[in-house]
Amino acid sequence: MTPSPLAAFSQAAPIAVALDAPDVQTACSWAAAVAPEVAMLKVGLETYLRDGAEGIAAIREAAGDLGGRRWLFLDLKLHDIPNTVAGGARSVARFDPALLTVHALGGPEMVRAAADALPDTYITAITVLTSMDTTTMATVGLAGTPADAAVRLAEMAVEAGARALVCSPLEVARIRAAVGPQVLLVTPGVRPAGAAVGDQKRVATPAQAIADGSDLLVIGRPITGAADPGAASAAIAAEISSSSGNDGRISLPSHG
């Protein structure tokens, strides 16, 4: 039986490090440095489109076995007609991703197609990108605030079979209240106090995101841009631990 990706959260800090590297060698060095400290490693479009299956294999080798836990967060943000998304999901099954992202804006049939295609993976629906604000949404024809849209999309995606959601730190409390405790909430736009926000527009500190209901923090440049990524990830894990009053790990209910 394929192990649940939630096992990662009982063994390491609830952080997914974004391996948005300029080359596979750099991605591998980051993976080796941070893998012992964090729950997951996120491979996104930049790395996947450049390095493909060989890149994932190299990163997996660099990260090591890590007790056999499923640590691959494949962030491809699939968004197409349901049949195409289902085919895309099946094509990455060989990597055994713990999480695979799709855009909730693709609609319930698309989300359901992905969930049916990869039943052992947590299909993770993107609500509203953290680079978007109210002005950006209006420009592309989306009414309302990012928070209102994120809650609507979250409820729809969960109803369609998504078992995880991506939302900004500013919406995580509302989405947790809307979807309940059984859905994994993944939060990008997390920046330690004093860190540069870059191109993110809706951000929070790690401690605040966890306090508001996030389960997994996606962190890239504050870790990978550090002189010692391993030490940076350990420091953020310690910040989460000290603020939450536990060992920096979290316990989640078993998902069906």
Image (cartoon, helix red, strand yellow):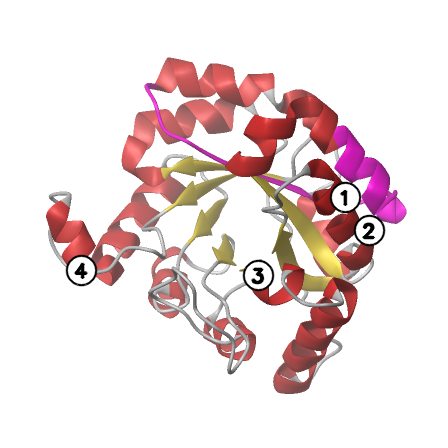
**Residue 22 drawn at (x, y percent):** 61, 43
Q: Which residue is mark 1?
A: 28
Comes first in the chain, label 1 or label 3? 1
Side of 70 where 135 appears, left or right? left
Q: Is residue 1 visible?
A: no
Q: Is residue 47 visible?
A: yes
Q: Which residue is mark 3?
A: 221
Residue 248 drawn above or below residue 193 = above
Of tags 4 and 2, the one toward the viewer is 2
The type of residue carrying mark 4 is Thr
Q: CA distance from mark 1 to mark 4?
A: 37 Å
Comes first in the chain, label 1 or label 4? 1
Comes first in the chain, label 4 or label 2? 2
Numbered disc 4: secondary structure: helix
Q: Is residue 78 part of the magenta span, yes or no?
A: yes
Q: CA distance from mark 1 to mark 3?
A: 15 Å
Comes first in the chain, label 3 or label 4? 4
* Mark 1 Cα-neighbour bin, 10 Å: few <14, some 14–19, many ≥20: many
Q: CA distance from mark 2 to mark 1?
A: 6 Å
Q: Quadrant of residue 83?
A: top left
The type of residue carrying mark 3 is Arg
User: What range is drawn magenta here?
Assistant: 57-81
**Count of numbered labels shown in the rendering:** 4
* Mark 2 Cα-neighbour bin, 10 Å: few <14, some 14–19, many ≥20: some
Comes first in the chain, label 2 or label 3? 2
Q: Is residue 4 part of the magenta span, yes or no?
A: no
Q: CA distance from mark 4 to mark 2?
A: 39 Å
Which of the numbered marks, if any, corresponds to residue 32?
2
The type of residue carrying mark 2 is Ala
